[in-house]
Image (cartoon, rainbow, N blue to C red):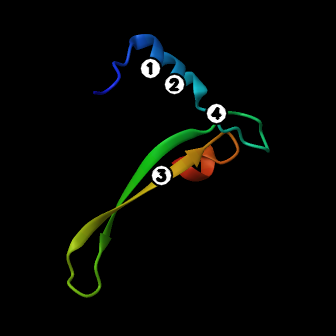
Amino acid sequence: MAKKQTFADKVTKGQRRSKLICPKCETEYSFFLHVAAEKSEKTGAYKFGERHIRVCKCNEKQIYN
C-alpha cells in the first residue's frame, strides 16, 4: 500500500529543490517554455518545437527582444 502524503511532506519536498543562480549577475533563473512553429521541408506541414529557456537579468533583453 502507498504511503499517505501530507501537506507538510509536500512543502518540505518543494523546499529541498535547490534554486539555480546565474554566476554572472547572481540572480535566480526563471524558466520559460518557448514554443515556435516550424515548417517541415519534406512535407510542408507545420509542427511546434518546444524548448525550456533559463532567463536571468543578464540575458532577458536578448530573450524578450
The tag earlier along the polypeptide, 2 or 4, is 2
Q: Which residue is mark 1?
A: 10
Q: Amino acid at mark 2?
A: Gly
Q: Dot 1: within a 10 Å radius of its alpha carbon, few (fewer than 14), some, or many (20 or more) residues?
A: few
**Residue at x 28%, y 79% (from the top left corner):** 40
Is there a contact, CB below 8 Å, between mark 1 and mark 2? yes
Q: Amino acid at mark 1?
A: Lys
Is there a contact, CB below 8 Å, between mark 3 and mark 4? no
Q: Dot 4: within a 10 Å radius of its alpha carbon, few (fewer than 14), some, or many (20 or more) residues?
A: few
Q: CA distance from mark 1 to mark 3?
A: 24 Å
The reply to whether residue 41 is in sight is yes
The tag earlier along the polypeptide, 3 or 2, is 2
Rendered image: mark on residue 52: 3
Q: Amino acid at mark 4?
A: Lys
Q: Which residue is nearer to you in this view: 9 or 52? A: 9
Q: CA distance from mark 4 to mark 1?
A: 17 Å
Q: CA distance from mark 2 to mark 4?
A: 11 Å
Q: Secondary structure at mark 4?
A: loop
Q: Which residue is mark 2?
A: 14
The reply to whether residue 65 is in sight is no
Place of residue 58 in the rendered image (x, y in percent of width and height, measured from the top left): 70, 44
Q: CA distance from mark 3 to mark 4?
A: 16 Å
Rendered image: mark on residue 19: 4
Is there a contact, CB below 8 Å, between mark 4 and mark 1? no
List the single residue furthest toward the bottom: 42
**Side of 49 where 14 appears, left or right:** right
